[in-house]
């Protein structure tokens, strides 16, 4: 799957908007509708045709019998023209309807419940998952019958596929960083002289992110969308996973990759992308003493008199303290744009973004004379 995921807005789509039947010869085979449907309906990325997903389905007959198992963890794959079940062929029943829940990527074999995730007709549960490079996703539950099996919007929004409309949402979060300098030079109006700073980030490591967790989704009353788990921090609710093992945290990940940035990243006033973090991150609450950023920088200052000084700088900070974000939530692509201040300090005088409060000034004073009284005599 793509390593960058665009933050998508949740969309609720039922098969009530469908009208056309997909036919193969004389039979109505069940196919699936992804790709452009996801892109246009949710302002997100088209689903990757190289990644099979899994699906579960339940049949309800017109006579009223409900929730008969229809598909159990079936693998759905793109065969070059349509998305269809890979190991068994299924056809639409003549009466009643079928309800589908899908997840991605496919985990397990047909007719055997996969361990990631566990799905029932009303729930999706991830248990003790170690988050890695897989983009874990779940789809809205959809209800379809044979004559309502295709999106029939205008040609712009039509996916180009016929089948069960399958809209995926990201169960995890994505994380990346940009860096910039709030200024690289400063002119002092009193002396009409300019000081310049050249800041180069030589190491930028993220560390101690939780990697193992659990998440349970419950079906909402609309029968389509999912109620995400809620963790309350202060007075605000966040959709995050439960940390299964606090000791399961990432080792430091270097985002100033030497192969990409052999000389480090020289800051300008334009934000620059760092190498993205590997894989995805578990949606988690940010806390002091937990998730960290470790920075090593080299600062070269060209003084207003033309001379230069150079110094190395190291700092470790809590990620919770560098912005107002309190948590990384599900289905979010979090992009931190970090503004480095080469010489400034937080100040109540409003000079946070300029060097006025760290300008070198002097405090002159004169030491008191030391009075020494002594008797002396001269012989004439």
Image (cartoon, rainbow, N blue to C red):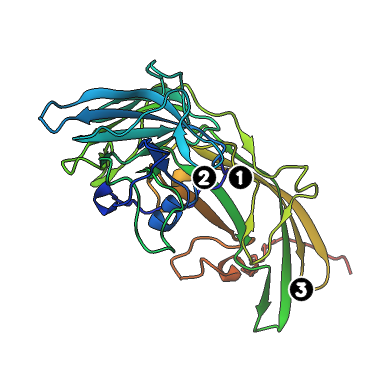
Q: Where is residue 223 in the image (x, y as percent from the top left)?
A: 20, 40
Disc with the residue nearer the chain's start (1 vs 3)? 1
Disc with the residue nearer the chain's start (3 vs 2)? 2
Q: Residue at x 24, y 42 (%)?
A: 224
User: Farthest residue in the left direction?
Assistant: 64
- In this rendering, position of residue 85 left or right of residue 226: right
Q: In this view, does 57 lie above or below 321?
A: above
Q: Please say whether residue 134 is visible from this viewpoint.
A: yes
User: Number of callouts in the render?
Assistant: 3
Give the SS element for disc 3.
loop
Which mark is drawn over residue 304? 3
- In this rendering, position of residue 238 left or right of residue 65: right
Front in this rendered view, residue 266 or 59: 59
* Residue tagged 2: 175
Q: Which residue is drawn at 47% across and 28% down?
A: 106
Would you identify the image quadrant in which residue 233 lies?
top left
Would you identify the image quadrant in which residue 123 lies?
top left
Q: Where is residue 48 in the image (x, y as percent from the top left)?
A: 53, 42
Q: Position of residue 168 (x, y in %)?
A: 39, 42
User: Farthest residue in the top direction?
Assistant: 112
Q: Which residue is drawn at 25% across and 34% down?
A: 98
* Residue tagged 1: 276
How busy is the neighbourhood of tag 2: few (under 14 within 10 Å), some, or many (20 plus)? some
Would you identify the image quadrant in which residue 255 lies?
top right
Q: In this view, does 219 lie above or below 152?
A: above
Front in this rendered view, residue 118 or 13: 13
Cβ atoms at labels 1 and 2 below 8 Å apart: yes
């Amino acid at each position: 799957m793509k390593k960058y995921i665009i933050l998508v807005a949740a969309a609720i789509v039922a098969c009530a908007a469908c009208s056309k039947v997909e036919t193969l010869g004389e039979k109505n085979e069940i196919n699936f509708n992804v790709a452009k449907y996801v892109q246009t309906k949710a302002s997100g990325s088209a689903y990757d045709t190289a990644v099979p997903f899994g699906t579960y389905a339940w049949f309800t007959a017109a006579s009223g019998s409900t929730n008969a198992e229809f598909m159990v963890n079936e693998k759905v794959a793109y065969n070059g023209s349509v998305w269809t079940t890979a190991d068994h062929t299924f056809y639409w029943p003549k009466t009643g309807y079928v309800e589908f829940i899908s997840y991605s990527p496919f985990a397990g074999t047909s007719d055997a419940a996969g361990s990631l995730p566990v799905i029932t007709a009303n729930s999706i549960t991830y248990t003790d998952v170690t988050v890695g490079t897989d983009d874990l996703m779940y789809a809205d539950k959809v209800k379809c019958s044979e004559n309502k099996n295709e999106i029939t919007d205008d040609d712009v929004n039509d996916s180009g596929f016929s089948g069960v409309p399958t809209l995926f949402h990201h169960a995890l979060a994505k994380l990346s960083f940009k860096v910039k300098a709030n200024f690289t030079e400063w002119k002092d109006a009193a002396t009409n002289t300019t000081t310049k700073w050249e800041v180069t980030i030589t190491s930028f490591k993220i560390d101690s992110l939780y990697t193992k967790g659990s998440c349970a989704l419950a079906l909402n009353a609309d029968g389509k969308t999912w109620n995400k788990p809620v963790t309350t921090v202060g007075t605000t609710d966040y959709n995050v996973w439960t940390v299964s093992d606090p000791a399961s945290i990432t080792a430091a990940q270097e985002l100033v990759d030497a192969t990409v940035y052999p000389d480090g990243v020289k800051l300008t006033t334009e934000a620059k992308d760092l190498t993205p973090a590997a894989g995805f991150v578990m949606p988690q609450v940010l806390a002091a003493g937990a998730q960290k950023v470790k920075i090593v920088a080299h600062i070269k200052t060209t003084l207003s008199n033309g001379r230069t000084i150079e110094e190395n700088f190291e700092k470790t900070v809590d990620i919770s303290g560098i912005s107002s974000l309190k948590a990384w939530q599900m289905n979010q692509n979090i992009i931190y744009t970090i503004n480095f201040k080469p010489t400034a300090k937080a100040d109540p005088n409003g000079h946070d973004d300029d060097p006025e409060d760290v300008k070198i000034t002097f405090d002159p004073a004169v030491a008191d004379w030391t009075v020494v009284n002594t008797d002396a005599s001269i012989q004439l």
